[in-house]
Amino acid sequence: MVDDIVLTAPLFAGLDDETATALAEAMKPVEALRGDVLFHEGDPGDRLYVIREGKIKLGRRSNDGRENLLAILGPGEMFGELSLFDPGPRTATASVVADAVVMELAHAELVAWLKDTPSVAGHLLQALARRLRRTNEALADLVFSDVPGRVAKALLDLSTRFGEPVDEGVRVAHDLTQEELAQLVGASRETVNKALADFAARGWVRREGRAVVLLDLDRLERRAR
């Protein structure tokens, strides 16, 4: 039985139900716990992944040990496809943030599928373009936005994918430590915590461990601009 959430990945876009199901069934499920690493930056890139359950972070580490998070991905999202179009070492490390099940597909098998259904390549390229657009926006934010603005924008972005409506607003179970959230924003943990404390004092958010309840979306959206 193939989960519907897996079939929402760009890999399956444009395929009829029978073909999509056959492709999904050809993928191998991999279970991983928080802290596990699926691949390291610099490893050979020979397969792509679709997330069925859990959350995955993509990050890069500098020579002095500092880490920058490029993205937090959840169910239905895909990663590792870049090396299909540009063979070479992995450009980031993929680690498990919340216990996960991912579906993996070796590139040799994917290439065989693409020969029969070349339209899939177009959807994969669209997914890459969306990721590049997000990367460009993140770079612009680092230059033009202050830390509170970046924190507000990160919370709103996480809410669109991981948020659940509650009576008071939207609860976002991001599963990130304070350090990981700071790495995602591109700032120190102290500065990010100060911004979150200010948001909480203003009644915009309420912190709940590795989750946050967004109480005033309008104010956060204005602060993110």
Image (cartoon, grey):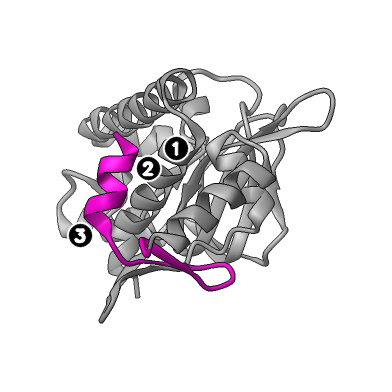
Number of the front mark, 1 or 3: 1
User: In terms of image quadrants, where is residue 166?
Assistant: bottom left
Q: Residue 142: image x %, image y %? A: 49, 24
Q: Which residues are magenta?
A: 203-225
The kind of residue on which mark 3 rests is: Glu
Number of the front mark, 2 or 3: 2
Query: Distance from label 1 to label 3 (Cα)?
Result: 43 Å
The label shown at residue 153 is: 2
Q: Secondary structure at mark 2?
A: helix
Residue at image coords 67%, 67%: 33
Q: Which image quadrant: the C terminus?
A: top left
Is residue 22 visible to the viewer in this orientation of the structure?
no
The label shown at residue 125 is: none
The label shown at residue 150 is: 1
Tell me whether the residue at label 2 lies in contact with that at label 1, contact meaning CB atoms closer than 8 angstroms: yes
Indicate yes or no whether the magenta region holds residue 39.
no
Q: Nearer the viewer, residue 144 or 166?
A: 144
Residue at image coords 66%, 24%: 89
Q: Nearer the viewer, residue 172 or 71?
A: 172
Tell which residue pokes out farthest to the front in this image.
201
Quickly name the residue at label 3: 18
Tell me whether the residue at label 1 lies in contact with that at label 3, contact meaning CB atoms closer than 8 angstroms: no
Query: Distance from label 2 to label 3 (Cα)?
Result: 39 Å
The kind of residue on which mark 2 rests is: Lys
Q: Secondary structure at mark 3?
A: helix
Figure check: 186 above or below 102: above
Residue at image coords 61%, 31%: 45
The tag earlier along the polypeptide, 1 or 3, is 3
Tell me whether the residue at label 2 lies in contact with that at label 3, contact meaning CB atoms closer than 8 angstroms: no
Q: Residue 71: image x %, image y %? A: 50, 41
Q: Is residue 135 left or right of residue 219?
A: right
Figure check: 21 above or below 64: below
